[in-house]
Image (cartoon, grey):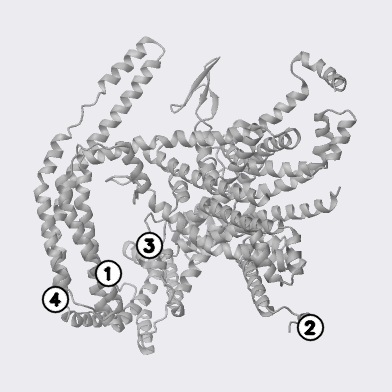
Amino acid sequence: MFNPENLILKGLPKGHIKDRVVRSLMAGLTYAIVLIAALLFGKIIVDGAPVLFKAQAPFVDFEFLTAKNETLHVFDDAQGTRHQLPASAYSDYIKKHEGTPIFNETTYSYSGGGIAGPIVGTILLTVGSMILALFFGVCAAIYLSEYAKQSPFIHAVRLAILNLAGIPSIVFGLFGFSVFVLAVPVITATPSDRSLLCVPLFINDYVMSFQGWNSSLMAGCATLACMILPVIITASEESLRAVPQGFRDASLALGATRWQTIRKCVIPFSLSGILTSSLLAITRVAGETAPIMFTAAVAAKDDLPWQGLKSPFDLLSSQVQALPYHIYTLAARIPSSEYTQRAQYGSVFVFLVIVAFLSLGSMILRSKLRSKLKW
Amino acid sequence: MPNEEIPENQAAHRFKKRGFSFESAIRYFFASNAGLTIVILTLIIVFLLKEGLGFFPGYRRELEVYRIAGLEFVDISRKNLTDHEQLTSVLNRAYYAEINGKCGRELLRSQEANALFNAYTDQTSSTRDLVLNNTQAGENKESKILAALGTNFAKQKAKALKSLPATPHLSDRERHDLIESIRIRSLESTEDPALVTALAEEFSNAQQKQAESLIGMRATIDAFDAAGAELSMLVSEMTEMVTATKEKIQDADILEKDRKTLLAAASSAKDAVEREKLTAEALASLADKPDVEGPIKKLLERRPQCSDAHRALQKSVEPLAAQLPESLSQPEASRLLSAARQTFPVFITNLEKTLPAIRDWNDKAPVELTAAIGSFLTGKDWVTGGEWQDFYGILPLAAGSLMISIVALVLAIPSGIGAAVYVNQFASNREQSLIKPVIEFIQAIPSVVLGFIGILVFGSVLRDLSTWDSLSWIPGFPIEERLNIFTAGCLLALMSIPTIFSLAEDALNNVPSAYAEASEALGASRVQTTFRVIIPAAFSGILAAVLLGFGRVIGETMVVLLVAGNRIKIPDFTSGLGSFLQPSHTLTGIIAQELGEVPLGSVHYRALFVVGILLFAVVLTINATAHRFVNKMKR
C-alpha cells in the first residue's frame, strides 16, 4: 500500500546520493576554474613581484617603472664578476674601463632598463581612445535612450552595434590599417604617391590628400575607439535607462525642453554609472594588441613619446610603444633566458597589476553604486 | 483635439520660421553620433572588400604565369620526387630504428657520455676560446689579463662540473672516471675523453654486428633511393628552365604596370611639356613581349624523358613490398615499416596517374577566375615568399583555427556551463561572492598575458608532463612540440569560460522562478529540478552562450599567434587524437604575423584581407545565430 506518510518519514528524497555526487561534481568544476586562475596569478606574482619590489625601503623599484627600455648587455669582467647593464650604462662602463677586456658578452634586445616607454604609450593610447569613444558613445547612447522611437534607422543602428561588438579584434586591426593608416585625409603640401585622392584647397600648395595618418598614435586611438564604441554605447544606454522615467516626466511637466531635461535631470544621475562601466572598457582597450600592431605600436623606441617633438601635433603622428605589444615582443621575438626573465615577468606583473586595479575599481564602484542609487 | 494642439504648434512656430531650432539641432547631433556606428560598420565592409577583392584577379594572373611558364608541368614530376624522398627517409628511419633499437644499451651509454661531455664544453667553451686566443696571439699581452682569464676559466669549469646531467646507464665507476678525466684535461686538448671514444666505438661495433643480418634490407633501400636519381636530375634541370621564363614574364608584368602608371600620370599632368615627356617615357619602357613559346617547347621536348623516368621509378617500387622483410623486431621500426607499406600502393597509383597527366598537360589551357577562387578556398598549401611559386590555400589555416576551437570548446563548455549551473542553483551567497569576481577577473586578463603564460610556462609544463611514463598511453604523448593546438586550445578555453559562464548564468537567471517552485512542489529534488526543468527552459540561452564563446575563440589572435606553434600545415590526421598535439597556424594568426611584412597592394597583402573577410563573415554568422537564440528565449 502506498502510504504518503512513508514519503515524509523518509525525510530525504530517493536520489540523495546522486544529488550529492552531481552537486560536488559541479562544485569541483567550478573550483577547478578558480584554482587555475589562482595558480596563474600566483605564478606571475611569484616571478614578477621581485622585479618591482625589494626588501629595503622604499620597497618599490621605481627604476623599472621610470627607466627607458633598452638592450641588455651581459658580460664578465676580468675578475669573473657577471655584469648586466642596459645599453646606456654599458657604454659608460666601456668608456670608464677602457683597455680592460670583457668576456662572454651577449646581448638581449628589449630586456634592459625599465618599461617607462610602454607604460606611457599605453596610457596615451587608452586616454586618447577613451576620450573619442566616450564622446561619440555617450552621445549615441543619449539618442538611443532619450530620443529614439521605433524606426528603420534605429533598427539599423542597433544591428550595427550588435555586429560591431562581435567583430574580432584582428579585423579591427585590418580595418584600422586600411582606413586610418592608409586612407583618411590629411592636409599637406606634399601628397604622397599612394594618395587615393587629392582635393586642392586653393591655399598655397595645400591639398587634402587621402593618404592616411601612417602608423601613429592617432591612428591607434581611432582604431581602438571604433572597437570599444559598441561596449560604451551599450553600457551608457543601460545607465541612462536606469534613471527613472519620473525624473524626465517631472522635468518636462515643469516646462523644460528635452535637452534641458537630458542635461539637468538625466545625465547627472547616470554619469557615475557610465564612468563605472567605462572602467571595464579601459581594461579591454589597454589589453588589446591586435588592433594596434599595425596602426600604432612599435617594438623599440629610444625617446619617450614627448621627447624631441617639434610641435604637439608630432605627438599624435608618432608611433608609440605599448605595454601589450611589448609583452608580445618579449614573449615571441626573443629567446627566453635567465637574463630576460626580469623584463618579461616584470612587464607582465606590472600590466596585470594595472588591469587588476582597474577591474577591481570598477567592481567596487559598481557595488557601491548599486547600494546608493535606489529609486 | 485641435484645441489641445494649438499651444504646442504656436510654441514650435517661432522656431519653425527659422527653419531649424536649437532643440532639433541637438537631436540631429545625437542622431548623427548614433549613425556613426553604421558608418563604421560600412567602412569596415567597404575597405575590407576594396583591399580584398583585388586578390582574385591578381592570384589568377599568378596561377596563369605558373602555367604558361611551365612551373605546373615541373610540379607534376616534383610531387612524385618528394614522395619518393619521403618514402626513402621513412625506410631509412625504420632501418636505423631497428639497428639502434637492437643495440639500445650501447646507444644510451654512448649518448649519455656524450651529453655529459657536451654539457661541460657548452658551458666552458667561450671562456676557453678566450684563453686560447689570448695565449696564441699575445706574446706582449699583460700577464695580469692572462691570469685573470685563467681564473675565470677555472671558475667556469668548477661551475660546469657541478651541474652535469645524470647518466643512469653508466656505472658509478665509469661516471667518476669520465668526470675525473675532464677535470684533469688540459686547456689545449681537443680530443674527446677516452671513455666517450670507447663508448662510441662500442656502439658502432654493435651497429655493425646488427647490420649484418639486415644486409638485404639495406641493399633494397639503396636501390630504391638510386632509382629516383634520374628523375631528380631531370626535375632540377627543368626547374632552372622554367624559373628563367617565369622571371622574364614577371619583369614584363612589372614594366607593363609601370607604363600604365606613367600613362595615367601623363593624362593628369598639368602642362603639355610634362605630359609629352611622360608619354614618351611610357612608350620607351614598352616591354618586349617575353618569349614563352620557345622555352615551353624545349620543356615539352622532355616529355618522353620524363615519362621514362617515371616508368623506371614505378618499376623499382613494385617489387619493393616483396623484397622488404615482413616485420622487424623493434616496435618503432615495425611501425615505420608498416607505415611505409601502406604508402606503397598510394605511391604507385600516383605514379600511374602521373603518366597521363604529363601527356595531357597543356600550357595553353586558360586559367579562369573561378580556378583562383577555388584554389583559395580548397588549396592545401599556404606558401608565401618562396622563390618557386606562392600558393594561397586557406585549408591549413582554417583547419588550425577549427581544431583549436574544438579543443577550447570541449574544455570550456562543460566547465563554463557547469560553473554557471553550480553558482546559480547550488552555491551559497558566500560562494557566489567568491566565484563571480574571480571569473570576472579572468575575463579582464589581456589575451597577450595568457599567451605569455602559454609560451613560457604552460607549454613547458605540458611537455614535461607528457614525458612521464605513466601518461604514455595518451595518444600523441610524449609531445614533440611545446607549442601546439592543444596548448592553445587550453588557454583559449580559459579565455572563453567567462563569456560562456556569464551568458549561461544570465540565461538561468531569466527562467521564471515559478518553474522551479512548481517542480519542487511536485516533490522533485534540487538536482532534478535543475536538470529536468531549469536547464531545458534556459536551453536556447545556453546555446547562445556557447555560440558566442565559439565566436570569441575563433576571432582570438594573440594567444594563438604566440602559442599555436605557427606551422602552416594541415595536421596529420593519421595519428588520431594525437593530431591535436601538433603545431598549426590560424586564420587570425596569419594576418597578425604577415601583414607587417608584405608590400602594400601585393597579391599576398590582398590575400590577408580576404582571410579577414572570411573571418568577419564567419564570426558575424555565428553571432547572428546566437542572437537569434537569445531573442527566442526572451519571447
Of residues A344 and B188, the one nearer the viewer is A344
Question: Closer to the camera: disc 3 or disc 1?
Answer: 1
Query: Can you identify the residue that label 4 sits on?
Result: B216
Q: In which quarter of the image is residue B368?
A: top left
Query: Can you identify the residue that label 1 sits on?
Result: B339
- Residue type beneath disc 4: Gly
Of residues B518 and B408, the one nearer the viewer is B518
Quick one: label 1, few (<14), some, or many (20+) residues within 10 Å? some
Q: Do the residues labelled 4 and 1 touch (CB within 8 Å)?
A: no
User: Percent x, y for residue B333?
Assistant: 27, 75
Residue projecting furthest to the front: A1
Residue B476's disc is: none
User: Percent x, y for residue A26?
Assistant: 64, 70
- Using the image, name the chain to which the residue with label 3 belongs: B
Residue B141's disc is: 3
Question: Closer to the camera: disc 2 or disc 3?
Answer: 2
C-alpha distance separating marks 3 and 1: 63 Å
- Using the image, name the chain to which the residue with label 4 belongs: B
Question: Closer to the camera: disc 2 or disc 1?
Answer: 2
- Residue type beneath disc 3: Lys
Discs 4 and 1 share one subunit? yes
- Residue type beneath disc 2: Leu
Give the side of residue B95 with respect to residue B499, left or right.
left
Provide the secondary structure element on which disc 3 rests: loop
Picture residue at 31% right of the left edge, 72% below the top? B188
Q: Quadrant of residue B496?
A: bottom right
Of residues A189 and B359, the one nearer the viewer is B359
